[in-house]
Every structure is written in C-alpha cells, then in structure tokens.
Image: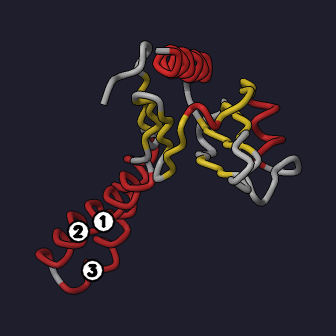
Amino acid sequence: MQLSATPYEERLTAPRSWWLISFLIGVSLALILLPFGTLPMLGGLVGGTAAAAVVGSSYGSPRIRVVGDSLIAGEAKIPVSALGEWEILDAEEARAWRTYKADTRAFLLLRSYIPTALRVEVTDPADPTPYLYLSTRDPQGLAAAIDAARGTAAERDEQ
C-alpha cells in the first residue's frame, strides 16, 4: 500500500481530567469496600481505578488516518475518490452540526470534548451516507491530507 503525500494520523484521546475521574472512581469503590477491611479497600482502589481507566481509554481510542487513497475514521474506511467538498467547523458550527443540523444518515465520529471538526461530503451515489462528521483537533491538517491523497490518487489514475 502506497502512503499518501501528506500522511495524517490522529488519535482522539480522552482529556487529562478523565484520568483524575478514573482515580476518583477507584477511591469511591475503596470507600465502599472499607468496612470489609484494608485488603478489599486496596483491591477496590486499584480495581476501580483500572476499570475506569480502561473504559476511558477505550472510548478515546478511535483514530483518524489518511492512508494511501483511503480515509479511515474509527471503523469506517472510505476511498478519497468517494469524498466531495470538506468544510472546517469551528466550535460553534461543530456544535450545530452535532445537534440540530445533523442528518441521521450521516457518519459521526464525534467526541464532545474536541471542539473543532471536519465535515466531508460523500459523493458516492451507492452510499446513503450524506457526509462524514469527524471530530479532530487539526481540521486543517486533515483537510490537507484528504486533498493530497485525492491528488495522488488522480495521478495514479492518469498513469
């Protein structure tokens, strides 16, 4: 597989405050288990913190990548030739597209703790998805990578 001219990869990690919340969940479980003794309390602290951290980490694990001539967002993989125009969404516009402007058929890879996003139209007539909504911390970089991948795919088609 040939890489795109401008490779792009981003992991939508959970914010740092979620790790503190994971620890506080462990403390809560430790306090619940305190009447049973010191060992169950320590087990609750470690186990509760670890379980909450795993849940937070798995929620923050999706990646957005532009590889070769494909855009991979979470579990979705779509060729850049099936993508149309993109629109960079600032915090206000991203909120609007997450709420009242949203289309139920759209593919949404959103994380509410990431304020900016990129909305990309899907031009494939066989695909009922009208657009992709992708939460990203670098919408300009993602848009540039899509354009670069589109350009390299067009060059390969011409050859």
Marks 1 and 3 sit apart, C-alpha to C-alpha, by 16 Å
Q: Name the residue under label 3.
A: 33
* Number of residues whose C-alpha sits closer than 10 Å to that of mark 2, classed few (under 14), some (14–19) or many (20 or more): some
Taking depth in this image into account, of 124 and 18 the one nearest to the observer is: 124
- What type is the residue that disc 2 sits on? Gly
Residues at discs 2 and 1 in contact (Cβ within 8 Å): yes
- For the view shown, which residue lies furthest in the right direction? 100
Q: Residue 19 carries which label?
A: none
**Image side of residue 27 versus residue 102, left or right:** left
Q: On the image, which quarter does residue 13 sit in? A: top left
Taking depth in this image into account, of 57 and 7 the one nearest to the observer is: 7
* Residue found at x 60% / y 37%: 135
Q: Classify mark 2: helix, strand or loop.
A: helix
Q: Name the residue under label 2.
A: 47
Q: On the image, which quarter does residue 42 sit in? A: bottom left
Residue 114, percent across and down?
A: 59, 36
* Residue found at x 50% / y 36%: 71
Residues at discs 1 and 3 in contact (Cβ within 8 Å): no
* Number of residues whose C-alpha sits closer than 10 Å to that of mark 1, classed few (under 14), some (14–19) or many (20 or more): some
Vertical position of residue 25 compared to residue 156: above or below: below
Asked if residue 90 shows in the view, the reply is: no
* Residue found at x 88% / y 51%: 100
Q: Please give the count of numbered marks on the rendered protein.
A: 3
Marks 2 and 3 sit apart, C-alpha to C-alpha, by 11 Å
Q: Classify mark 3: helix, strand or loop.
A: helix
Q: Earlier in the sequence, mark 1 or mark 3?
A: 3
- What type is the residue that disc 1 sits on? Ala
Q: Classify mark 1: helix, strand or loop.
A: helix
Q: Mark 1 points at which residue?
A: 51
Here the colouring is secondary structure
Asked if residue 17 shows in the view, the reply is: yes
**Image side of residue 69 versus residue 143, left or right:** left
